Image (tube, grey):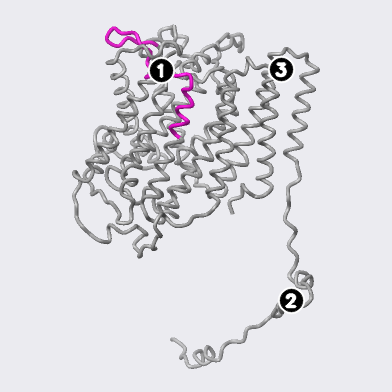
Amino acid sequence: MSLSAYVPIVWLLALAAAFGLFSVGIAPFVGPRRFNRAKLEAYECGIEPTPQPIGGGRFPVKFYLTAMLFIIFDIEIIFLYPWAVSFDMLGVFGFFEMVIFIITVAIAYAYVWRRGGLEWD
Amino acid sequence: MNPTLADFGHDNGWIVALKVVGVFVFLVVMTLFTIWYERKVVARMQVRPGPNRHGPFGLLQSLADGLKLAFKEDIMPLKADRVVFFLAPVISTVCAFTAFAIIPFGPFVSIFGQKTPLQLTDIPVAVLLVLACSGLGIYGIVLSGWASGSTYPLLGGLRSSAQMISYEVAMGLSIVAVFMMAGTMSTSEIVNAQAKGGQGELFGFEFTYPGWYVLLLLPSFVIYAISAVGETNRAPFDLPEAESELVGGFHTEYSSLKFALFFLAEYINMVTVSALATTLFLGGWRAPWPITQLGPWVNQGWWPLLWFTIKLLILLFVFVWLRGTLPRLRYDQFMRFGWKVLIPASLIWILALAGFKTMNNENLPGWQRGLWIGGFAVILLAILLWPRKRPAPKLPLEEEVAQRPEGSFPLPPIDLQVPVSPRAKRITADREPVQ
């Protein structure tokens, strides 16, 4: 098994990137261009757009919390994959190791649940 | 002879080029077809004809739509972050296409005399590539929402990313069981692992039931299917584009070909999760049971491409069916379902399966198995029936007022009658009764 099996992925990626960049690049030249100041404003169903601070302004902290919880569980998944692939080789030891690991994460999960971290208003 | 991991990475340059173009064309054609298919099926469900003007059965409708989009004005909002606004659709598209690199379409075929597997490539961490691509695809969505410099796209992009990362956890956990059974993450070997079915006997009639993981690992498949719908932002989980709340979601400010790229990426993602479901749970390109009775040729050469596409179309039909049938969920219900139901359910299922497999590998005697299963069930019941934190019952108003500490701010009497204002009285008195 060499790295040559990875090369076609790069080619597909390159083809998709070329296609995407080409489409996005030619769009302004193919379509018509009729200037209208209102058209370039942010769309808010026809009313005057709300002024936005530079950089998008503020948004609920819940989204940060979700992202952090995602990291915890994603890392758990990353540990689970190699364990699952070599499950038969690891035997009883591997099973109990993973039980202990999942219980550790489950305690954190139960804490987040009881503190209302999983509630969405 | 079925392709294994060792058979990849030996192709000529021009075969690789042919396969790359083949996958690309397959995805674009599938997208055009799926859009037509969805509109047609939804139309039939709603008792109307659907697209029927362009080409036979309206098949060229999506092509016409795509061309029309290309000749529409490309609007760049004044407040937009120009570079990111430009790049976000490209990120989405690239991630959507790349994920399909490791999907197996069939066994060995001969392309102009060259024997090669009908799959672009396969790597030891193939399924991880799909997850990585869907993870990176979120960047396209959140950046497009942020770069638009507008309120609705920002909210839509945030919702979308929160939804996708939540359901990606559930999706990642649901396929652990497949790796456990197959002992590999390479897609071609997972398909091979599902080839061996068992012998069954029904009413004296012997048959071979398929070794598909959808039968062995049904809970995994159910969790995968639900989270795949959430992951692709499809109805009933299409909250990022809830028209009644957010106009169009993250792509509100996009027009012309930039919008078309987001549309393309969304449909390719749908095809990808369906193809992954086919590969991981439905036996991949292998023909289902009654067809396998026809002879060994059904699983050789180019025929498997047909079975693969049929399985894909059935799964895509389910996507459309869901859209035609179910109303959209509320956002908090949706997030609660992902975090409080799907994730714990998949963790418990993984533990149960791992325990069962360990007991089988160790050849435990029956009474010990009973002991372990009983212990597991007791713990599970304890977790499920654990008392929840309940909010204190709401007291009647009189008791609440009585419980207030001494010297609190005075409350108006509960049965306060607000007197009618003298002005209102005067106006009422002045008015002539209308005839």
**Front-most of residues B98 and B23:** B98
Numbered tag placed on residue B408 in the rendering: 2
Numbered disc 1: secondary structure? helix
The answer to whether residue B295 is left or right of residue B36 is right
Mark 3 residue crowding within 10 angstroms, few (<14) / some (14–19) / many (20+): some
The amino acid sitting under disc 3 is Met
Magenta highlight range? B108-134
Q: Earlier in the sequence, mark 3 or mark 2?
A: 3
Q: Marks 2 and 1: same chain?
A: no
Secondary structure beneath label 3: helix
Q: How many marks?
A: 3
Q: CA distance from mark 3 to mark 2?
A: 66 Å
**Residue A3 disc label:** 1
Q: Is residue B105 above or below residue B298?
A: below
Residue type at mark 2: give it. Answer: Ser
Magenta stretch encompasses residue B130: yes
Instruction: Give me the residue at 27% from left, 41% from top.
Output: A24
- Examine the structure image and report whether residue B293 is included in the region drawn in magenta: no
Judged left or right of residue A54, residue A112 is right
Measuring from the top left, give residue B19's x and y in whole percent: 32, 19
Residue underneath mark 3:
B359
Q: Quadrant of residue A89?
A: top right
Q: Is residue B217 depicted above or below B235 in this figure? A: above
Q: Residues within 10 Å of mark 2 (few under 14, many from 20)?
A: few
Of the pair B429 and B233, the residue shown nearer to us: B233
The numbered mark 2 sits on a residue in which chain? B
Residue A114 horizontal/vertical position (percent) = 69, 47
Quick one: SS at disc 2? Answer: loop
> Residue B41's spot in the image, x, y percent?
39, 36
Q: Quadrant of residue B403?
A: bottom right
